[in-house]
Image: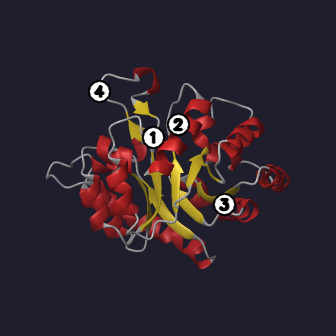
Amino acid sequence: MTKLGFQLYCARNFPPLADVLKKVAAAGYTEVEGYGGIYATMDELSLKTLRGDLDSNGLTMPTGHFGFDLLEKEPEQALLIARTLGVEGIYCPHLAPDARPTDAAGWEAFGKRLQEVSKRYVDAGYTFGWHNHDFEFKQLPDGSVPQDYVFAGGPDLKWEMDVAWVIRGGADPFAFIEKYKDRITAVHVKDIAPAGENLDEDGWADVGHGTVAWKDLLQALRATPAKHYVLEHDNPKDLDRLLTRSIQSFRAY
């Protein structure tokens, strides 16, 4: 059975982290995904303490989000984080609005830059890829989308596919699964509430309680190399509800 992990970003509004890890483990998860807000500035001692907290709760952190600046400018710190926490897959998760290219050439150049950054991490034995939001699927004036140019510029980049953001970007997730199925090494599993609902949660929903066709999507995704499926909800009101309902739904698929 495919396991479901948990992106710790979902719990940023429910500190302390030590209590979050206990809840995650108690709900039946064995994997978490880290993000820079937790560990980007930690020293080695703090990282070892976090690793101890993971271990004591029976949790591993096989994947992590690492900001582009950290990856490009502080590779030794990024490698220290990954090595200490047991991360195997490093994913660059975002590009700030003021840093986003505005045309196809710019996006392809960004892909080339990501590819260049990736070499140090791939050479060290890590999977390295991009994690999307919706802006990569917003059409450029000619109807093409930035995601294609990122991958054209970075032919060896892997992909942590955030399916719900693909949908919010106006694209067909099944078409992109088929197009880049050999690159998909991890997946973000989250759901979109029906129009007009859950507005106080930015329109997101617990998995299985929204509009995303997860049963069919998982069937398609299981034909890819994806090893890690990670629950995410960008702004949950109730962490316990999110954890319990989402894993119940996922296990039924």
Left or right of residue 201, residue 170 in this image: left
149 over 225 or under it: above or below = above
- In this rendering, the label closer to the viewer, 1 or 3: 1
The residue sitting at the left extreme is 142
- In this rendering, the label closer to the viewer, 4 or 2: 2
Crowding at mark 4 (Cα within 10 Å: few <14, some 14-19, many 20+): few
Q: Earlier in the sequence, mark 4 or mark 3?
A: 3
**What label sits on residue 78 in the rendered view?**
3
Numbered disc 1: secondary structure: loop
Numbered disc 3: secondary structure: helix
Left or right of residue 137, residue 202 in this image: right
Seen from the viewer's position, the closer of residues 9 and 213 is 213
Seen from the viewer's position, the closer of residues 27 and 84 is 27
Q: Earlier in the sequence, mark 1 or mark 4?
A: 4
Q: Percent x, y for residue 99?
A: 42, 47
Marks 4 and 3 sit apart, C-alpha to C-alpha, by: 39 Å
Dot 3 amino acid type: Ala
Q: Earlier in the sequence, mark 1 or mark 3?
A: 3
Q: Earlier in the sequence, mark 4 or mark 2?
A: 4
Dot 2 amino acid type: Arg
Residue at x-position 75% and y-position 36%: 19
Dot 4 amino acid type: Ala
Marks 1 and 4 sit apart, C-alpha to C-alpha, by: 16 Å
Which residue corresponds to mark 2?
Answer: 245
- In this rendering, the label closer to the viewer, 4 or 3: 4
Residue at x-position 70% and y-position 46%: 25
Seen from the viewer's position, the closer of residues 103 and 56 is 56
**What label sits on residue 207 in the rendered view?**
1
**What label sits on residue 195 in the rendered view?**
4
Residue at x-position 83% and y-position 55%: 48
Q: Percent x, y for residue 118?
A: 52, 69
